[in-house]
């Protein structure tokens, strides 16, 4: 059923049947409010245990009397209430009046509203999009999405409300942010922007992770079409857009989903399953057909109606385990006596299978914090079916290592080598996210030891290590300019830091890391096929805190890639990465190489343009490193004799000079 342009039409039997079995793929067409071409609007809501449901709004001055409220009628045994209000107009605010079994009537926002008031107001808003997409340029937008998602993945994580603000402290709308944000991320060479949750949420301090309106964009960002404009502009700049999505839990606010019809409708009735002890929220009942349909259709809604390129699914572990954050006696085992939430597992698999069928090429990324096996394995192979999984183990170990004083790093050497052991287990994304720069954890820069210049050098090394390590990467806003303060959702990035040479040097480094990675497929194309495309040169130099490894281009990439990367740092073969993570330069360091041609430095984090000491690595007058063919080393055919700059990561490749 189309929205605007349709006459008032009751739900059909097929719609009701599909919803009942949990497979209605366009639920937003069945439920919610829909303006009609001839005037007025239809309203439909699921409230199977309600005694009566009506709708009130601006058209009647919010008069809740029976004479003014629009009474809805039940639709068979579906639990859906439907009605038509001829006085409703675009922009009108409205709410449902739901009379529960307990005799209490509560005002409720529409669970499938496509627009909402700016908090703290809580009404839904009648809205139909008039947006005309521009970014496809004649190409099918789904094909363009698949192309964006099939290659390199370098993600810039953003909280729209605090990326940049007006001079008086007011937040920008999504439309106001569109060009500057897209231009900034594009200038840094990122391939995707990940937006922290943009669905309607009452409390700004939740950062969007306590959603009240799953189908309505946050009105703080402007209209829904303002958000569409931002996504469109990003696509026009060649950037994909990933949305943070929260299908695990929701807040207890009485205007939203909690006890919607006087009963536990969207949540579990038993608090041992229905309440989250850490977050004070309610847990979705993923075993109920209609709830599962509400969530799966919501994922499809954002992918279809807003043309986003993917979803990052929040708090997956909290869904998978019945005892998540619960003590003995506070949780109920599953029917097999185990701790796995079998209904949630089935929901996650269905989500990924349906998304792959209905929105092929879209990314679905798991934030999953445990060692659950097969998170990115296809569901029909026994996995969960996600596109990628956040590697929180890598994040924890890597930040722990870099927080150590260099003199102590010899005792933490394994924290950088161990993630390589399980690098083949999943399709990883390496996050340095918002979670690591808030709540007293300090900014990335202030996690680093030493004086200010040393902290900058450590941070440059950390970022280069992230970009060179197997797995795609994500960096939270502010990391690219070495933010000194913790992130606050009520402020903005400290843009003035770019006026300082060392901080602007980090910006240059991030841009160059993305550029070098884009020009050298060895640094990413083999991430998911590591068996023959990565190897340690030296993983055991604990004493000097030096690490070195090589990476190569998979044959499948060479066969499938029609356009070879171009640029001054472009190289189509193997690369070598060497990290010296103490403040002591290492002279006469011998590095084994397989290619006996001259080599070159693609990137050196100690270079002067990044704020480093500009120590000479060992190039000759022609800017190349000559291979010692008579001294094989580290099981390689030849070797290079290098000077390793202090607190640095260098990337090298054969020079391919004629």
Image: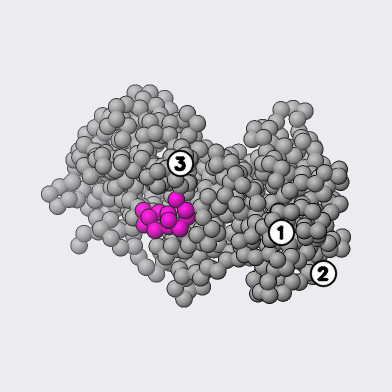
- What residue is pinned by disc 2? 13
- Examine the structure image and report whether residue 207 is included in the region drawn in magenta: no
Question: Is residue 239 toward the left or the right of residue 568 in the image?
Answer: right
As helix, strand or loop, the secondary structure at mark 1 comes to: helix
State which mark lies toward you, 3 or 1: 1
User: Marks 1 and 3: in contact by CB < 8 Å?
Assistant: no
In what quadrant of the picture does the N terminus appear? bottom right
* Disc with the residue nearer the chain's start (2 vs 3): 2
User: Could you tell me how far apart the alpha carbons at marks 3 and 1 are, in whole angstroms?
Assistant: 50 Å
User: Could you tell me how far apart the alpha carbons at marks 2 and 1 are, in whole angstroms?
Assistant: 31 Å
> Residue 412: horizontal and vertical position, in percent?
43, 28
> Residue 264: horizontal and vertical position, in percent?
79, 44
> Residue 440: horizontal and vertical position, in percent?
47, 29
As helix, strand or loop, the secondary structure at mark 3 comes to: strand
- What residue is pinned by disc 3? 432
Question: Is residue 628 toward the left or the right of residue 167 in the image?
Answer: left
- Examine the structure image and report whether residue 180 is included in the region drawn in magenta: yes
Picture quadrant of residue 542: top left
In what quadrant of the picture does the C terminus appear? bottom left
As helix, strand or loop, the secondary structure at mark 2 comes to: helix
Residue at 14% of width from left, 52% of height from top?
622
């Amino acid at each position: 059923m189309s929205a605007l342009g349709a006459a008032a039409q009751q739900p059909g039997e097929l719609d009701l049947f599909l919803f009942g079995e949990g497979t209605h793929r366009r639920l937003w067409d069945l439920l919610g409010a829909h303006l009609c071409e001839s005037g007025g609007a239809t309203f439909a809501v699921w409230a199977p245990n309600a005694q009566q449901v009506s709708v009130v709004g601006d058209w009647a001055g919010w008069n809740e009397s029976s004479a003014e409220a629009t009474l809805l009628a039940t639709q068979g045994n579906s639990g859906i209430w439907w009605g038509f209000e001829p006085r409703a107009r675009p922009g009108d605010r409205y709410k449902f009046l739901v009379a529960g079994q307990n005799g209490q009537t509560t005002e409720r926002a529409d669970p499938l509203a496509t627009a909402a008031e700016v908090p703290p107001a809580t009404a839904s808003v009648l809205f139909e999009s008039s947006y005309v997409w521009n970014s496809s340029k004649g190409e099918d937008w789904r094909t363009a999405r698949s192309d964006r998602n099939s290659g390199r993945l370098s993600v810039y994580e953003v909280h729209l409300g605090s990326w940049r603000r007006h001079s008086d402290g007011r937040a920008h709308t999504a439309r106001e942010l569109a060009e500057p944000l897209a231009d900034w991320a594009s200038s840094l060479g990122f391939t995707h922007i990940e937006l922290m949750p943009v669905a309607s949420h009452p409390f700004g301090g939740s950062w969007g992770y306590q959603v009240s309106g799953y189908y309505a964009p946050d009105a703080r960002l402007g209209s829904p079409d303002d958000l569409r404009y931002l996504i469109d502009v990003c696509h026009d700049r060649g950037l994909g857009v990933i949305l943070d999505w929260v299908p695990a839990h929701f807040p207890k606010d009485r205007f939203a989903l909690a006890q919607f019809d006087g009963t536990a409708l969207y949540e579990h009735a038993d608090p041992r399953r229905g309440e989250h002890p850490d977050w004070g929220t309610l847990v979705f009942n993923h075993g109920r057909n209609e709830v599962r349909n509400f969530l799966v259709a919501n994922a499809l809604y954002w992918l279809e109606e807003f043309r986003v390129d993917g979803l990052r699914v929040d708090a997956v572990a909290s869904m998978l385990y019945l005892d998540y954050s619960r003590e003995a006696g506070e949780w109920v085992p599953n029917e097999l006596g185990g701790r796995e939430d079998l209904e949630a597992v089935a929901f996650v698999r269905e989500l990924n299978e349906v998304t792959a069928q209905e929105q092929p090429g879209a990314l679905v990324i798991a934030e999953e914090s445990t060692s659950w096996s097969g998170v990115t394995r296809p569901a029909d192979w026994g996995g969960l079916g996600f596109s990628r999984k956040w590697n929180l183990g890598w994040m924890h170990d890597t930040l722990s290592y870099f927080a150590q004083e260099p003199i102590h790093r010899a005792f933490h050497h394994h924290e950088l080598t161990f993630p390589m052991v399980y690098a083949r287990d999943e399709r990883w994304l390496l996050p340095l996210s918002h979670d690591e720069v808030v709540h007293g954890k300090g900014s990335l820069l202030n996690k680093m030891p030493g004086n200010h210049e040393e902290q900058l050098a450590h941070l440059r090394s950390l970022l280069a290590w992230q970009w060179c390590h197997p797995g795609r990467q994500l960096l939270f806003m502010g990391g690219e300019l070495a933010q000194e303060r913790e992130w606050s959702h009520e402020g903005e990035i400290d843009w003035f830091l770019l006026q300082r040479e060392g901080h602007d040097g980090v910006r240059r480094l991030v841009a160059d890391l993305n550029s070098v990675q884009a020009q050298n497929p060895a640094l990413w194309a083999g991430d998911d096929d590591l068996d023959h495309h990565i190897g340690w040169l030296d993983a055991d130099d604990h004493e000097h805190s030096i690490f070195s490894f090589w990476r190569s281009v998979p044959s499948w990439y060479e066969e499938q890639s029609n356009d070879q990367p171009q640029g001054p740092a472009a190289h189509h073969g193997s690369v070598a990465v060497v990290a010296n993570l103490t403040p002591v330069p290492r002279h006469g360091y011998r590095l084994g190489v397989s290619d006996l041609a001259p080599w070159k430095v693609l990137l050196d984090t100690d270079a002067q343009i990044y704020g480093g000491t500009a120590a000479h690595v060992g190039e000759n007058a022609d800017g190349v490193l000559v291979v010692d063919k008579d001294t094989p080393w580290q099981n390689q055919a030849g070797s290079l004799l290098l000077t390793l700059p202090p607190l640095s990561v260098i990337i090298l490749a054969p020079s391919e000079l004629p």
